[in-house]
Amino acid sequence: MTKKMTITLEERLIDELSATAYALGKKKTQVVREALQNYLGEIKKEQDEQQWKTANKEAIAAYNERVESQGVFSDKLRLF
């Protein structure tokens, strides 16, 4: 389902949107929809990452402490 909405954009953005849509052979609405979906997807990804880091804060700290004191498992295997 789609709904109409009105947005206000700077003239420069409208010109850029028009040129981009024309170059891609798409409607301006489609370009805006795709851009918004991508933007919101990135925001969600960042939120999920932050949530994961918060949920795993203790495990990350413990791992970093172990690496600091013992190094990583491959330290003895490296030739450089």
Image: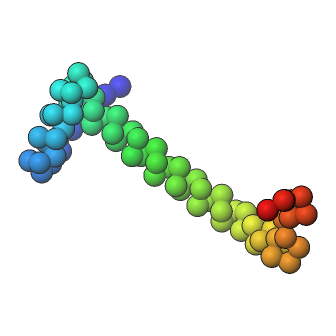
Q: Residue furthest left?
A: 11
Q: How many marks?
A: 0
Between 19 and 10, the residue placed more toward the observer is 19
The quarter holding residue 73 reads bottom right
The location of residue 80, given as percent across then percent down, is 79, 62
The location of residue 49, given as percent across then percent down, is 59, 56
Left or right relative to 63: residue 11: left
Which residue occupies 28% across, 29% down?
30
Between 38 and 65, the residue placed more toward the observer is 65
Q: Quadrant of the N terminus?
A: top left
The reply to whether residue 58 is visible in this rendering is no
The quarter holding residue 76 reads bottom right
Which residue occupies 27% across, 37% down?
32
Q: Is residue 51 above or below residue 38?
A: below
The reply to whether residue 49 is visible in this rendering is yes
Which residue occupies 33% across, 39% down?
35
Left or right relative to 20: residue 35: right
Q: Residue furthest bottom?
A: 69
